[in-house]
Amino acid sequence: MRDESGKRSRRVAVVGVGILGACVGWNLARRGAEVVLIDAGRPGEGVTDWSFSWVNASNKTVTRPYFDLNVAGMAAHRELAGIIGPDSWWYPSGHLRWTDDPAAEAKFLKTAELLGSWGYRVEASTGAEVRRRLEPALALPDEVPVVLYPDEAWVHGRHLVDRLVGQVVAAGGELRFRTEVRDIGTGADGSVRTVVLSDSNRLAVDIVVNAAGPRASQVAGLVARQLPMRREPGVVTRIDCAPVPIHRTVHAPHIEMRPDGDVSMVLHSRETDALIDTGEEPAELARLLHELARHVIPDLANSRIAQAQVAFRPIPADGFPSVGAVPSVPGYYEAVSHSGITLGPVIGRLLAAEILDGARDELLADFRPERFPA
């Protein structure tokens, strides 16, 4: 394949087709690259499908550069919805937060004040006002402080991945699903040359993008690269309920919830995640989440648990994304991050520009792979 200038376009293997891999592949394909999408399962059915899928920067204030990257991620989502259409994946309905713990309340109100000083939209409210104007189904005290972040959203990750993969195929991209990468071959100069799959196929490529999520460290090992990752499991539960009683993402005491379409909701809790390594079965963790949700939303009394899954979050060891080229292996790039739902569209755009143009954006300056020792 050749681009508009007549030059041979680069052949890029994207390993892992969750939200990050799909966004990278889509941005490359729309700019004329020859894209091969590779996944051990089906697109979007791994961690992406079992993420809380909350698009935000209000929970990303640990450093200003990380906050700024997530704000850019939110803007990139809005831009993407304008390009491909919002359809069944984009829900910019905002986010509510309150707590029943005085120390936690002081902390999140201080964070809200900081975010406001950074130009992030924050609206202060009370429980009574929230029930009257926004979410009448919530059981929360009249005077409890509630923060609304109106620009935040949730995403149906699997639907978005399906849309992006479909457009990659329409642009001439190749799909290699239900097969794993077993080897990455390099030339005499150490640069990427081939990808060997578990189905015995060997693909000639110019670039490999490691977007393999929880398996990213294994893929990195194929080029003798050490990518340290955290072990951080989380349990997400889907419940069936019709009609869905809330309209936006909600962080209530001990439980976080969001709609998941017209007839279901997603539940998650960090407190419940802490029980995973005690040996509790996913079904029991799901029951605990369901009980917490019913406490906050009495209308869920007749809802039922539909699915529960423990998934491992793809988090590099220092908690921040690893995005960009690895100088020791020409042609090898990483796109590995927690908050992949928020960051997918912006990382996809910036990494495609780096691969095709050599452009290293300052938004990624603190998150480059070379910060990890060789």
Image (tube, grey):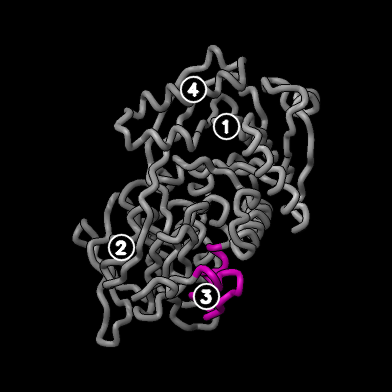
**Mark 2 or 1, which is nearer the eye?**
1
Residue 279 to residue 94: above or below: above
Residue 70 to residue 237: above or below: below
Q: Earlier in the sequence, mark 3 or mark 4?
A: 4
Per the image, the residue denoted by label 4 is: 290
Q: Do the residues labelled 2 and 1 touch (CB within 8 Å)?
A: no
Q: How crowded is mark 4: few (under 14 residues within 10 Å), some or many (20 or more)?
A: many
Per the image, the residue denoted by label 3 is: 354
Mark 1 and mark 4: span between their CA atoms? 10 Å
Q: Residue at x 43, y 71 (%)?
A: 369
Q: Earlier in the sequence, mark 2 or mark 3?
A: 2
Mark 4 and mark 2: span between their CA atoms? 36 Å
Residue 32 location, x and y as percent? 51, 71
> Is residue 260 shown to the viewer in this render?
no
Query: On residue 257, which mark appears?
Result: 1
Task: Give amino acid for label 2.
Answer: Val
Q: Depth check: give the residue in front, 51 or 157.
A: 51
Residue 171 to residue 178: above or below: below
Tell me which secondary structure the magenta stretch mostly adopts.
Answer: helix
Task: Give amino acid for label 3.
Answer: Glu
Place residue 297 in its image quadrant.
top right
Q: Depth check: give the residue in front, 61 or 286.
A: 61
